Amino acid sequence: MSRPASPDVELRRRIFAFFAANKRAPLAEEVGATAVDFSRLQERHALVVDDGGNIVIANPFSGIPTDYVVESDGGRWFANCCWDALGILAALGVDGVVRSHCSDCGELLELRIRHGELEPTSYVAHFLLPARRWYDDLVFT
């Protein structure tokens, strides 16, 4: 017999479902939460919230516009990085396109997922910091 999910796990599920359905970050009250709940999830590295208590990051979703745009079947979401952009498509179980720009030359970059697979590309992802340092400043990273 499995144990029921913790209230924080259930809240995270509601946040993700809201992002998926509404293409934006929820306000606390829209997912049955409080600012204290969001703060607690931030302390546990499950969210990043701004000074007003609004969600900035709920990996893989971004609560603010970014240069990583994910599109699928008329839906459009922002991601925090290329990895998260691919994660949105994987989490939703859909094919789609990820668009961004080269941070060096500004060239438009597109990645396509078809039938659950990344189409061949010559692109290389570069992470500015090792993973152990991402939470030093997750919004920058």
Image: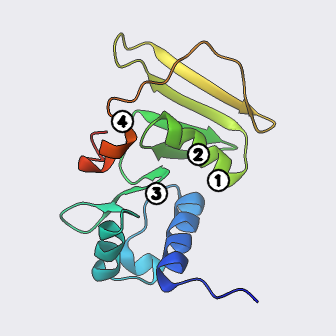
Q: Which mark is residue 101?
A: none
The amino acid pointed to by label 1 is Ala
- Mark toward the viewer: 1 or 4: 4
Q: Nearer the viewer, residue 21 or 3?
A: 3
Q: CA distance from mark 4 to mark 3?
A: 28 Å
Dot 3: few (<14), some (14–19), or many (≥20) neighbours within 10 Å? many
Q: Nearer the viewer, residue 139 or 132?
A: 132
Mark 1 — residue?
A: 91
Mark 4 — residue?
A: 130
- Mark toward the viewer: 4 or 3: 4
Specify which label sits upstream in the sequence, 4 or 3: 3
Q: Secondary structure at mark 2?
A: helix
The amino acid pointed to by label 3 is Arg
Give the quadrant of residue 63. bottom left
Mark 2 — residue?
A: 87
Q: CA distance from mark 4 to mark 2?
A: 19 Å
Q: Quadrant of the C terminus?
A: top left
Q: Position of residue 10 (x, y in %)?
A: 54, 79
Confirm whether residue 107 shows in the render: yes
Give the quadrant of residue 16. bottom right
- Mark toward the viewer: 2 or 3: 2
The answer to whether the residue labelled 1 contacts the one labelled 2, judged by CB atoms less than 8 Å apart, is yes
